[in-house]
Amino acid sequence: MAADIRHRVGIAAPQEQVYEALATKDGVARWWTHEIHGDAAPGGKLEFFFGGTEPSAVMEVTELVPSRRVSWRCVQGPDEWVGTDVTFDLKTTDDQTVVLFSHAGWREPVEFIYHCSTKWAYHLLGLKTGLEGREYTAYPDDMKISTWG
């Protein structure tokens, strides 16, 4: 039984600015993890580091639609993540940019999905607060929610 993580966050920032924070290495480094290597162009691979010498996850950039969508496919990382898709869809509603986030295609709803759902929500809220002029909370400055990080 497949499972997905889904979140909706409204951000008081222009859609183009939110897109840049999701589609570029410098943008993602502000809200998810400070250490990112690789190519953020479609077909490129991004390596995300969370404290180790090897990347914790490697995502292939599968789609970029300027100001509207960023999609990645996990090609290396936790077993539960490999083959899953991370997507950020953007639209403007009521003077804010709405981010519709999904981390889709988990093979089953294992305990790790609960942890990842909470961490994705936390980091998406960090994206919101940073773009709204407050503090970003990317790794390693993020809140640890359990012994898993």
Image (cartoon, rainbow, N blue to C red):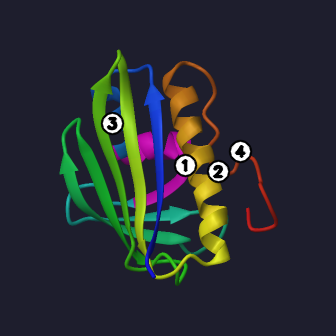
User: Label 4: which residue?
Assistant: 141
Q: CA distance from mark 3 to mark 4?
A: 21 Å
- Quadrant where the N terminus lies? bottom left
User: Label 3: which residue?
Assistant: 20
Q: CA distance from mark 4 to mark 1?
A: 10 Å
* Bounds of the magenta segment: 23-37
- Residue 102 located left or right of residue 144: left
Q: CA distance from mark 3 to mark 1?
A: 14 Å
Determine the image quadrant of residue 137.
Answer: top right
Instruction: Identify the residue at horizontal 51%, vertical 81% (top origin).
Output: 108
User: Label 1: which residue?
Assistant: 32
Along the viewing direction, whichever of 147 and 112 lies nearer the viewer: 112
Q: Give the structural element (helix, strand or loop) at label 1.
A: loop
Instruction: Identify the residue at horizontal 67%, vertical 63% (top origin).
Output: 115
Kindly indicate whether the residue at mark 1 contacts the one at mark 2 (C-beta within 8 angstroms): yes
Q: CA distance from mark 3 to mark 2?
A: 19 Å
Kindly indicate whether the residue at mark 2 contacts the one at mark 3 (C-beta within 8 angstroms): no
Q: For residue 33: magenta? A: yes
Give above or below for 36 relative to 77.
above
User: Label 2: which residue?
Assistant: 139
Question: What residue type is disc 1 on?
Answer: Trp
Kindly indicate whether the residue at mark 2 contacts the one at mark 4 (C-beta within 8 angstroms): yes
